[in-house]
Image (spheres, rainbow, N blue to C red):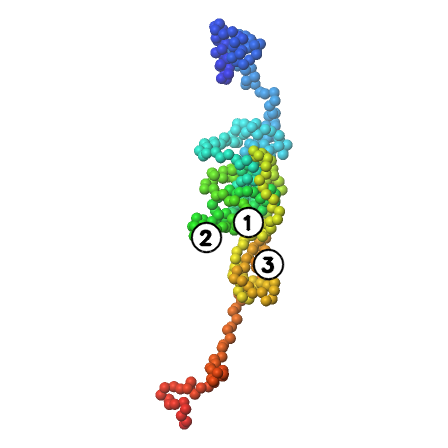
Amino acid sequence: MSLKERERLKLFARVKLGELQQKQAAEICGLDYRQTRRLYQRYCEQGDRGLVHRGRGRPSNRQYATEFRVAVLARYQERYPDFGPTLAAEKLALDGYVIDHETLRSWLLKAKLWQRRRKRPRHRSWRERRAHFGELVQLDGSHHKWFEQRAPECCLMNMVDDASSTSHSLFAEQETIFAAMELLWQWIDRYGIPCALYTDRKNVYVVDEKTREKAADSGLEALTQFGRACKQLDIRIIEAYSPQAKGRVERNHGTYQDRLVKELRLAEINDLASANKLLRDGFCQQLNQKFAVSPRSAADYHRSAKGYDLAAIFCIQEERSISPDWIVRFANNFYQLEPRRKAQVPCEKIKVQQYLNGELHFRYGTEELRYTLLPERPQPKPKQKKRTTSKHRGQQSLLPSNRAWQGFQFGQGSPWSRS
């Protein structure tokens, strides 16, 4: 008997003893009076067994056919053996086996093809989501065997909006400055410039404390290349001191590691270019449609990127010294620059920009200069010897090179003596 049926048993025992009326028992049970009379009559005729639901133990009239259940489990073991019930139900529906994920979960548990996962207790304080889309975006990289044993381990760069859980991702070999810049550029092209980024304390995003203190003592601001690009776009970088602090993107990594790995396996993708194409062609959009939520406020805090030269912002930018003959060294190569004006005298520094596509740009102030890659290191020009002069009666005369005293040697007589 269920708990509800045992409670009814106690009430009907009191009705039988005359302590309660059937109408009062109906109010306590929350049943109609006629239904209470029928249950009480079955109780008087059959005893405790009369209160047990008569459909218990009987197969449901809406249950799936046995052949369908066997086919679903066979398809699951054949193609989706390590898929969770939710993801497996989505894939089975594409194969023609439409079934609810909870029904599939019960079938898998009964067939011992799936095990319940214990959830760890929450021990950290909960932080409320930001109210506006674009107010705070979390950025992080996830190193994982995304291609399983088919290719080496790589990194998935991932951005997740804090207010709506909207995500956008990109595959790269490592979590580098170029990968972070490219991902942020794609986010700006799609949604706009966010107000703030929530990142960890890797040197890709922020400098370490010692470098920051040294720069502060000199009155300067120490920034990474990524931090400099964010400053030009007026994007604030907030540092996270633990993985749990940016839990939104960390949990999103788990979703990608569960679903994306299996999608790459089904599509037989083994390289970064094809994997990025899969992300662009709809995987990220499908994930957002399923897991993204509506922010508390309808206002979008993204700003337009109109007026910004994003290619010149998302680049490696450094200052280099320039020689008097307009030669610059960068990345262990030497470049001959072409000044705009022939009589132009070079200053001490020039700005070198390496774009994400590999292009080099040399900017002299506000001007961009043409350049030529030199095949080897330029050799310095030989210095010209100066001719020695002496003054005689206010006029300069050349000194003779064959002076008599230059050939004198001690003990061999005077150079002026004649033999």
Q: Which marked residue is nearer to the observer: mark 2 or mark 1?
A: 2
Gap in Å between the C-alphas at discs 2 and 3?
28 Å
Name the N-terminal-most of marks 3 and 1: 1
Name the N-terminal-most of marks 2 and 1: 2
Circle 2/circle 3 CB separation < 8 Å: no
What amino acid type is highlighted by mark number 2? Gly
Picture coordinates of residue 183 (x, y %)? 56, 46
Specify the farthest residue to the right. Answer: 96
Residue topped by disc 2: 219
Residue at (49%, 11%) from the top-left corner?
11
Of the pair 371 and 287, the residue shown nearer to us:
371
Q: Quadrant of the C terminus?
A: bottom left
What amino acid type is highlighted by mark number 3? Glu
Q: Quadrant of residue 410?
A: bottom left
Circle 2/circle 1 CB separation < 8 Å: no
Residue topped by disc 1: 232
Residue topped by disc 3: 367
Asked if residue 92 is positioned above or below residue 141 in the image, the reply reads above
Residue at (52%, 31%) from the top-left corner?
114
Asked if residue 237 is positioned above or below residue 26 in the image, the reply reads below
Q: Is residue 417 left or right of residue 291?
A: left
Name the N-terminal-most of marks 2 and 3: 2
**Within-10-Å neighbours for mark 3: few <14, some 14–19, many 20+:** few
